[in-house]
């Protein structure tokens, strides 16, 4: 199922990453997974937490603006070629991947979890389910 | 055979009005003022209606003091009458148009008859002569050629002086330096910041510019400290030249050998200092906004044009012997306009550009810096929730759209930097949109 991810705009200068993480830490919010995209001028911190609405509020109270984006967590065989197999299904469904990253905390039993961002998440979920790709539910990810 | 203005140089005949006895100068000014007011009244509907509103006719100007009865002309008057609404000559008599940026993306157009161009050349000759240039000087003109008045103004003035003019235009530092060395350049016209860059590059490239003697610098504000640095680094004499397109271009005034204040060519441009709030005329010595009236312009007379430049009139005689009065170095402006690379910019133009892209005005700040002698303008734009995208390519596309939108309006390539929301300083009341770090 789709998952809510939070994204935060960061300027490319020292201290920019620490401020949001400190705010989240003081509110006892645990980051389940995160990735940092960077360019020469700015970065985008993307992360997943159990309660995105609360995290968004905490950040807003700290003077930061986080946006919510829907991403699709997909189960992948944790072995050589596992991700390639899923990407084949994605290609066959004609879907474009905006970005993706590993959800390490949710891998278990020879299975890994990868978070994908598609242009149209709803269309991606239905196309991939048809193709037999296993999409993880938030219960599975967060347990 | 020698000529009057061979080195070491003496008195240039064209410079004679610089030394007119004050009463004679005032008589010339009054005669010309009456004539230009009549011309404006007869040929320019805007001036006529403003005088009619005040119950004035050209005959109302009986003394120089009567000028204070006339309305001011402001930059928006040029915009509102774009392109030709303030012309007082038919197009058949206009031989040149120049243009500079206005407040809304429309340029301001200025016109010259042949007689106007002759006056322009004359004041440029007088400017160069006051800087110590003469026949035999090799003048590298690095002001931009084109719609900007700097390039052609200095060009024809240099030729009329009898100097050898090299029409370099701006940019291409290596080529500038090659020419400077190989052609034995003795004088240069450009912005002071660009000259500093040339000097730095010349030292790196081991260019010999020892024949260079004089720099005539303008088109941007600069300080006494910058002059000290230029003179110490390069060994030349650096002179400030003042002008604005609305009045004529460069050559409204210049510093003489004393380098203490800018002499205004008062027989062609009548200066007043006013209180920018009340509009009242201030006495000599008081600081206020410079207002100029063109006394001899035909194609486009300007009556009491508010320059927005803040200065004061130095009435005491100058040690150089000129009787035309000086103004003190212009350090700031009475509005929020700033000048970058010779282009007039209002923060409102940047706002218009930002609005065009996203429809809502984000918080922004303009930062002016100087890098390698060139003015740089950076616009910091807060990434609001409305425009924030989680995808880098969309943010980069936003940045590029903002840059092109600003370039379309200003005609200047500027750098747009996206910054985090709520990071730009908020101020009570009027926002401080511009941070000038150019240290002039």
Image: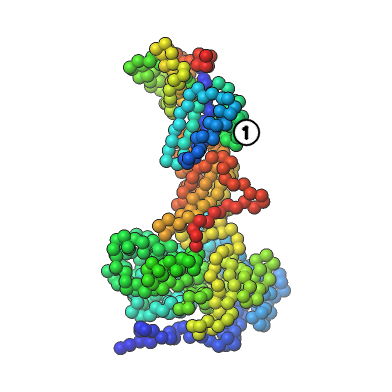
Vertical arrangement, residue A90 with respect to residue A65, above or below = above
Q: Secondary structure at mark 1?
A: helix
Vertical arrangement, residue B430 with respect to residue A3, above or below = below
Residue at numbered disc 1: A61
Tell me which corner region of the image, top left, top right, bottom left or bottom right, holds residue B21: bottom right
Q: Position of residue B46 (x, y in %)?
A: 63, 67
Q: Position of residue B370 (x, y in %)?
A: 45, 57
Image mark 1: chain: A
User: Residue, x 32% and y 71% (percent of image)?
Assistant: B210
The mark tally for this picture is 1
Residue B358 seen anywhere in this rendered image of the structure: no
Q: Nearer the viewer, residue B282 or B304?
A: B282
Residue B336 seen anywhere in this rendered image of the structure: yes
User: Residue, x 49% and y 68% (percent of image)?
Assistant: B224
Q: Nearer the viewer, residue A27 or A65?
A: A27
Q: Nearer the viewer, residue B150 or B427?
A: B427
Is residue B283 shown left or right of residue B150?
right
Q: Nearer the viewer, residue B79 or B319?
A: B319
Q: Position of residue B20 (x, y in %)?
A: 53, 86
User: Residue, x 35% and y 66% (percent of image)?
Assistant: B168
Tell me which corner region of the image, top left, top right, bottom left or bottom right, holds residue B237: bottom left
Circle 1 Cα neighbour tier, 10 Å, few/some/many (<14 / 14–19 / ≥20): few
User: Residue, x 46% and y 83% (percent of image)?
Assistant: B15
């Amino acid at each position: 199922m789709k998952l809510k991810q939070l994204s935060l705009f960061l300027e490319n200068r020292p201290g920019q990453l620490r401020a949001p993480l400190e705010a989240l830490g003081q509110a006892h919010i645990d980051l389940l997974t995160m990735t940092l995209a960077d360019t020469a001028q700015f970065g985008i911190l993307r992360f997943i937490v159990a309660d995105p609405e609360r995290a968004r509020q905490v950040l807003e109270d700290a003077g930061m603006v986080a946006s919510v984006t829907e991403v699709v967590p997909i189960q992948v065989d944790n072995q050589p070629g596992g991700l390639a197999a899923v990407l084949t299904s994605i290609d066959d469904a004609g879907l474009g991947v905006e970005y993706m990253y590993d959800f390490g905390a949710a891998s278990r039993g020879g299975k890994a979890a990868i978070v994908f961002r598609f242009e149209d998440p709803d269309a991606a979920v239905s196309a991939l389910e048809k193709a037999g790709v296993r999409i993880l539910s938030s219960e599975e990810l967060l347990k | 055979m020698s000529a009057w203005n061979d080195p070491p140089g003496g008195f240039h005949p064209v410079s004679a009005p610089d030394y007119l006895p004050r009463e004679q100068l005032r008589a010339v000014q009054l005669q010309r003022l009456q004539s230009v007011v009549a011309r404006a009244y007869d040929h320019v509907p805007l001036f006529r209606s403003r005088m009619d509103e005040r119950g004035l006719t050209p005959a109302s100007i009986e003394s120089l003091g009567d000028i204070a009865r006339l309305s001011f002309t402001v930059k928006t008057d040029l915009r509102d009458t774009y392109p030709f609404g303030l012309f007082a000559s038919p197009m058949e008599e206009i031989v040149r148009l120049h243009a500079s940026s206005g407040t809304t993306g429309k340029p301001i157009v200025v016109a010259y008859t042949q007689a106007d161009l002759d006056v322009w050349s004359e004041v440029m000759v007088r400017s160069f002569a006051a800087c110590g240039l003469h026949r035999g000087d090799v003048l590298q003109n690095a002001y931009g050629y084109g719609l900007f008045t700097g390039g052609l103004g200095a060009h024809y003035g240099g030729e009329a002086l009898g100097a050898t003019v090299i029409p370099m235009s701006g940019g291409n530092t290596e080529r500038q330096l090659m020419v400077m060395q190989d052609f034995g350049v003795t004088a240069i016209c450009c912005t002071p910041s660009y000259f500093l860059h040339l000097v730095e590059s010349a030292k790196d490239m081991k260019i010999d510019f020892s024949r260079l003697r004089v720099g005539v610098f303008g088109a941007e504000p600069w300080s006494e400290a910058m002059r000290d640095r230029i003179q110490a680094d390069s060994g030349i004499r650096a002179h400030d030249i003042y002008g604005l397109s609305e009045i004529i271009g460069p050559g409204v005034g210049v510093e003489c050998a004393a380098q203490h204040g800018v002499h205004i060519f008062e027989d062609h441009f009548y200066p007043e200092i006013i209180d920018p709030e009340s509009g009242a005329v201030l006495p000599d010595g008081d600081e206020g906004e410079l207002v100029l009236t063109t006394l001899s312009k035909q194609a486009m007379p300007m009556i009491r044009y508010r320059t927005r430049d803040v200065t004061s009139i130095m009435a005491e005689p100058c040690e150089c012997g000129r009787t035309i009065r000086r103004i003190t170095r212009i350090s700031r402006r009475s509005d929020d306009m700033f000048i970058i690379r010779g282009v007039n910019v209002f923060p409102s133009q940047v706002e218009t550009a930002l609005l065009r892209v996203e429809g809502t005005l984000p918080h922004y700040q303009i930062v002016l810096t100087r890098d390698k002698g060139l003015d740089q303008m950076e616009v910091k734009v807060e990434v609001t929730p409305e425009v924030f995208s989680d995808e880098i390519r969309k943010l980069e596309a936003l940045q590029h759209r903002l840059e092109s939108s600003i370039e379309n309006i200003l005609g200047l390539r500027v750098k747009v930097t996206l910054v985090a929301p709520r990071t730009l300083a908020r101020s009570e009341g009027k926002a401080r949109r511009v941070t000038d770090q150019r240290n002039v």
